[in-house]
Image: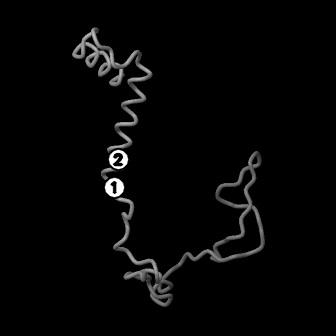
Amino acid sequence: MTIVNSYILWSLMRGEKTPYHNNLKSFRLDLITARVSIGHQKFPEKRFASISYSEPMKLKFRKHTVSEKDRLKNVDHIPTKCKSRRCAYCSTRVKPHRTRWMCPN
């Protein structure tokens, strides 16, 4: 829509005496080539020359975790792995669901 409006304005400003573009298609193609050439001028060929890829980047953070001892202290409900069985929570007769996890209590 904006390209059509700009074509109409351009043709009105330019005048009908010397039509540079015969139709909207040639106007669009010239507009695209102008935008692409601006993009090539804006970004140089070696955009990432300052970054060295010779060695892998070292991560400066670590995952924060709670120790196993503190995590399992005073916990009443810890699911454990078992043989495959029907889920007591979400299984129905119409849509059965099986699970390998169960609460030992």
Above-or-below relation of 77 to 4: below
- Given the image, on which type of amino acid does mark 1 rest? Phe
Report the quarter where the N terminus lies. top left
Q: Residue at x 26, y 17 (%)?
A: 9
Residue 14, image x, y percentages:
24, 16
- The disc at residue 39 is 2
Which residue extends farthest left? Answer: 13
Residue at the farthest front position: 18
Residue 43 disc label: 1
Q: Cβ–Cβ below 8 Å for labels 1 and 2?
A: yes
Q: Does 65 sit above or below residue 6?
A: below
Q: Position of residue 66 (x, y in %)?
A: 44, 84
Residue 83 pos. (x, y %): 77, 73
Observer-nearest residue: 102 or 51?
51
Q: Secondary structure at mark 1?
A: loop
Q: Is residue 18 left or right of residue 36?
A: left
Q: Residue at x 63, y 76 (%)?
A: 105
